[in-house]
């Protein structure tokens, strides 16, 4: 079954139909889902979701646009949440220079702190990097992130940059963007990267694939991503599903109690 490695079902976009939508996942081929925290408020909601749905797991961290809310008390809260059963990653964490909501120095400081949290709790990381390619790679190398492991979520950089992360042992998260007409760069990355280093994700409710582009995204649309990856790599869709599921299990479920 499809393993959805990055969604935000705590988002208000799902307030009207969250329960019915999540209850429909497994009958539609979505076997497991990781709900990824981004804000301070999402930490508790992610905990509630992973406790309510047997097939749903949690990742805990603060998005770079939200690090203004980080302090030592919140870091302690993150540490405690990462100890929970079904907590499978620290994330999403990283750098975002597109919105520049928080200063670069502040983002880098808390990025380092959260990378080291992941090392301490023995969990992989889910990395967000937007318009910050050089600094993200530099910080990850300085912090020896290859010893931690994880995924570059919604990978959007060049094939050459992908090769750098693959050499560090990281996985690449592939979502709806790969179906966009103007997504030449990411299609080149998918073509070049080994299938056993790709993960399926949506970033729901964002980045819905064609033919739903511009609408609310959800994990039920992942077959469109599977179809495009299979087309690019010249293999069957069943192989994409099977291999990416094993990839996600290898990365995220080794620490599940």
Image: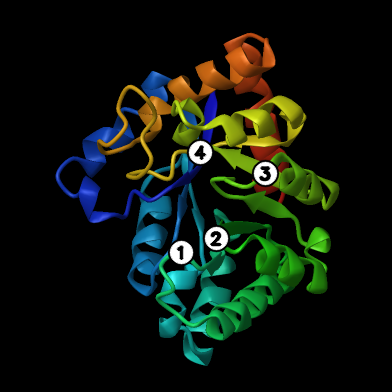
Question: At 68% from the left edge and 17% from the top edge, which residue is drawn?
Answer: 233
- Work out whether 59 lies above or below 230: below
Picture quarter with the N terminus: top right
Indicate which disc, 2 or 4, sits on the residue closer to the N terminus.
2
Q: Distance between the residues labelled 3 and 4?
A: 19 Å
Residue at disc 2, secondary structure = loop
Question: At 62% from the left edge and 83% from the top edge, which residue is drawn?
Answer: 109
Q: Distance between the residues labelled 2 and 3?
A: 12 Å
Question: At 41% from the left edge and 61% from the top edge, which residue is drawn?
Answer: 47
- In the image, taking residue 122 as reference, residue 113 lies left or right, namely left
Residue assigned mark 4: 201
Q: Residue 214 location in percent, x, y?
A: 27, 36
Q: Nearer the viewer, mark 4 or mark 1?
A: 1
- Work out whether 161 lies above or below 90: above
Mark 2 Cα-neighbour bin, 10 Å: few <14, some 14–19, many ≥20: some
Q: Residue 139 location in percent, x, y?
A: 73, 72
Q: Say which of 225 and 79 sits in front.
A: 225
- Cβ atoms under marks 2 and 4 closer than 8 Å: no
- Cβ atoms under marks 1 and 3 closer than 8 Å: no
Residue assigned mark 3: 158
Q: Which of marks 3 and 4 is in front?
A: 3
Q: Distance between the residues labelled 4 and 1?
A: 21 Å
- Cβ atoms under marks 2 and 1 closer than 8 Å: yes
Residue assigned mark 2: 131
């Amino acid at each position: 079954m499809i393993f959805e490695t990055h969604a935000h079902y705590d988002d208000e976009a799902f307030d009207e139909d969250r329960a019915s939508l999540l209850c429909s996942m497994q009958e539609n081929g979505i076997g497991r889902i990781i709900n990824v925290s981004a804000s301070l408020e999402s930490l508790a909601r992610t905990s509630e979701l992973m406790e309510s749905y047997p097939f749903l797991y949690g990742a805990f961290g603060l998005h770079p646009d939200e690090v203004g809310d980080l302090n030592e008390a919140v870091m302690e809260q993150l540490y405690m949440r990462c100890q929970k059963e079904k907590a499978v990653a620290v994330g999403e964490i990283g750098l975002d220079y597109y919105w520049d909501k928080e200063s670069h120095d502040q983002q880098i400081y808390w990025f380092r702190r959260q990378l080291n949290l992941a090392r301490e709790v023995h969990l992989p990381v889910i990395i967000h990097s937007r318009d910050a390619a050089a600094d993200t790679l530099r910080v990850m190398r300085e912090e020896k992130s290859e010893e931690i492991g994880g995924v570059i979520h919604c990978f959007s950089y060049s094939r050459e940059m992908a090769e750098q992360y693959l050499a560090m042992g990281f996985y690449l998260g592939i979502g709806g963007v790969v179906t966009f007409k103007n997504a030449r760069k990411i299609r080149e990355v998918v073509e070049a990267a080994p299938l056993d280093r790709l993960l399926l994700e949506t970033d729901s409710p964002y980045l819905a694939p064609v033919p739903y582009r511009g609408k609310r995204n959800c994990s039920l649309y992942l077959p469109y991503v599977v179809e495009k990856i299979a087309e690019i790599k010249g293999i069957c869709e069943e192989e994409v599903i099977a291999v990416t599921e094993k990839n996600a299990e290898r990365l995220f479920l080794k620490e599940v109690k």
